[in-house]
Amino acid sequence: MKTVQRSDERILSSDIFDRGSARGGRADLGRWQEPARDIPVYHRTQVLVVGGGPSGTAAAAAAAKAGADVTLLERYNHLGGLSTGGLVIWIDRMTDWQGELVIRGFAEELFDRLPADAVAGPSRADWGNRDPAKAAYWSNRTAAYHGVVTWSPTIDPERLKLLSQDIVLERKVKLVYHSWACQPIVEGGVVKGVTFESKEGRMAILADVVVDATGDGDLFARAGAAFDNDIEEADVHHCMNTSWLFGGVDMNRWIDFKTQRPDDHAAFMAAGREACGLFERPFVSWRNDIALFMGPRQSGYSALDVDDLTEVEVRSHNAMRAHLDFFKARAPGFENAYLMLSAPQIGVRHARRLKGLDSVLRSRWSEGTALPDEVGVTPAVSPKFPNISIPYGALVPVQLDGLLACGRHVSCDKNSHGFMREIPQCWITGQAAGTAAALAAQAGVQPRAVAVPALQAALQRQGVFLRPGAPTAEAGVPAAAAA
């Protein structure tokens, strides 16, 4: 076990648990030749978004709002991805360190429309507040860091599923559940659509532009685009786990125990690590009687290896059972706890990152300037840094055409990935990718040739927060970004 401490570059602190002994290599059991076959074309569309997680939902909604004919392909029975099915219901910071809301657009629409009882967090008047008492209160409720109150609420995942579905259907998106994209259809270096599997067997969807919102870069990798997959095994941002919820708790009592009896709390956590091995602290949710466990975070596993994914699921579910027994017996506020839900989706934080025409880079954190092709703004990891510009080039593959990427696999270095993988940033890059895909399809051009000023204007019409920057190129990604 490693303990990662909070720092200027790592806003989270957490225990990280190694996998233990490495699994041996998989035996070579030979090959089977799959016969060639003709498959039916299920649908033709202008914009195909593959993956209905935070970025994919935002991409589909934005592309449709921009006037495109849109299809959204999702392997599960709901939208929202890790923010719903993955129980990542603690939504990371959407305000900067001055309290200004910078994650806007689709994200702001969601919170404007979610029912009041589906959201828990500080009032708008307190965003950016540095009062020590208020910061101390909200720091135990996932909404204050470095002594600053932030807008980083917890939400009801079922309400977010419903609202996400409502929005895309209101905009006439063709929604296809229970369907897993298999292979991109590529002709002459241009992605033309995908094949997918469902209960009907294998079929194809053809599209003018495909948005890869799989989270793991499955489509751009299989289409031959360059990517990075370097990780830091001692980094919370590169671990995996399955989250869960306990019901029947009293989180106010737990927080009182944690804050008013720190020595007893430290002893409790030490005993938990000794008794359970994998051990994690609870977080608040949108209700006082529901506790969220977003760990234990496990390192040394690959999100692209089916055996590793299986092992993480087994370890996480066993940890959930062990936590329930230990917390019920010893934790104030957990005497009546019960197993409520384990996440239907595994919590993958990192697999691949696109090599794009530009990237979100650690070397730029201190600059604070708007890049010429800015399509979104993200809060920095600490008050030490200004807000960080997200360039359109981070969504565009270096060579592959017909495809844009959004979500946790956009082009960035491994330090910047720590925040670019978060739910709000996925909403931002998804909205940018969907809008750009719509403009490309309507103009009959490749995504890399989309006029950046037109894209920025379209995003601002959708409520995205952008800043005045250097003069943009008349069309396409600025030359400096591609260098």
Image: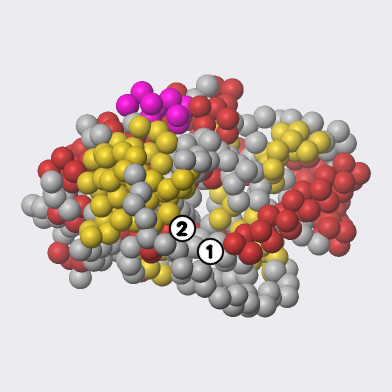
Nearest the viewer among 206 and 324 is 206
- The majority secondary structure of the magenta stretch comes to helix
Q: Residue at 32%, 66% (x, y): give it.
A: 225
Nearest the viewer among 281 and 213 is 213
Q: Earlier in the sequence, mark 2 or mark 1?
A: 2
Residue 434: image quadrant is top left
Was residue 167 drawn as part of the magenta stretch in this picture?
Answer: yes
Return the mark for residue 216.
Answer: 2
Whole-percent x, y for residue 453 in the image = 14, 46
Residue reaching furthest to the left: 474
The quarter in which the N terminus is drawn is bottom right
Nearest the viewer among 138 and 424 is 424
Q: Which residues are magenta?
A: 163-172
Q: Residues within 10 Å of mark 2 (few under 14, many from 20)?
A: many
Q: Residue at 23%, 35% (x, y): give it.
A: 68
The quarter in which the C terminus is drawn is bottom left
Using the image, determine if residue 318 lies above or below residue 459: below
Using the image, determine if residue 247 lies above or below residue 450: above
- SS state under label 2: loop
Return the mark for residue 154.
Answer: none
Q: Residue at 55%, 38% (x, y): give it.
A: 84
Q: Residues at badges 2 and 1 in contact (C-beta under 8 Å)?
A: yes
Using the image, determine if residue 194 lies above or below residue 353: above
Whole-percent x, y for residue 348 in the image = 56, 55
Residue that numbered label 1 is attached to: 304
- SS state under label 1: loop
Give the amino acid at mark 2: Asp
